[in-house]
Each structure stands twice: as structure tokens, then as C-alpha cells.
Amino acid sequence: ISIAYTAFSPRPSISRHSSIATNPPMDRSKPKDYLILAIIACFCPVWPVNIVGFVYSIMSRNSLEQGNIDGARRLGRVAKLLSVVSLVGGAVIIVACAVNLSSKPSLTSSPEPRGSFSSS
């Protein structure tokens, strides 16, 4: 009796069987964890963001190994987002530092030599 009750239960949270009406068939291919992208992003100077992206990538891989495909897909998307933000932010920081260093006058080419006094 309990098997028949749970199979035809009006509340899908109680039943152990998934319904086609409540859970439409989705793409069940292996989700990406973007681990290589996260590792490359760790070389950018945006440390907190890229380390969190790396952790999400590892969590995505672990979720896939446990069979949680939806969780692995969700964590993989977050890892990709954080890695891309880290790469773009790192590129902006590197370009800003390069522009800042190239625009400053060199210390070796001062207009007046030190130690010389004007005779006025």
C-alpha cells in the first residue's frame, strides 16, 4: 500500500519516484568543472577572487564524482564566472601598472644635476 501511495502521491516531495511533469528531461552530459581555467586564473593578481574560483572548480569536480550532476553544473558555472572575472581583472591591473610605470619620468634623467647651486 505504501508503494502505491508514494508513486501516486499528489505531493512530489514525498514520493521517491521522479515525475516527468515535475522534472523534465534535461541534458545529462558531463558538466565542465573549468579546472584548467581556474588554475590559469590563479596567476593573475586578483588573489581572493581566483582562489575562490579554484575552490568552486574543485567542488564541482567532487559533486560530479558523487553523482550530483546539477550541483556540479551550477558550481562549474560559478567557477567559470569567477575565473573569467579574475582574468579580466588581472589584465586590467597589469595594463594599469604598465601605463603608470611608463608615464612616470625616469629618475636617472633629472633636468638639473644634484649638488649644483645656481649663482644668483
Image (cartoon, rainbow, N blue to C red):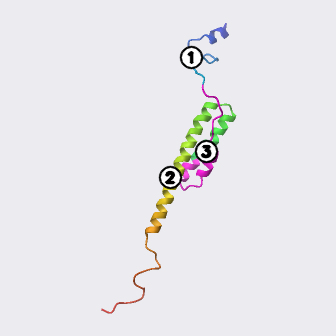
Work out which residue is located at the far left of the displayed protein and give it: 120
Q: Is residue 117 left or right of residue 8?
A: left
Residue on which the image places disc 1: 21
Look at the image and tell me in which quarter the C terminus lies: bottom left
Viewer-nearest residue: 58 or 108: 108
Image position, residue 116 (x, y; %):
40, 89
Q: State the CA–CA distance, disc 2 to disc 1.
A: 43 Å
N-term mark: 2 or 1: 1
Image position, residue 35 (x, y; %):
64, 45
Write down the region rendered in magenta: 26-51
Residue on which the image places disc 2: 89
N-term mark: 1 or 3: 1
Q: Residue at x 60, y 42 (%)?
A: 56
Q: Callout 1 environment at 10 Å: few (<14), some (14 to 19), or many (20+)? A: few
Q: Residue at x 46, y 77 (%)?
A: 107
Is residue 27 highlighted in magenta? Answer: yes
Residue on which the image places disc 3: 55
Which element carries disc 3, helix, strand or loop?
helix
Viewer-nearest residue: 47 or 95: 95
Q: Residue at x 63, y 40 (%)?
A: 33
Image position, residue 109 (x, y; %):
45, 80
Q: Amino acid at mark 1?
A: Ala
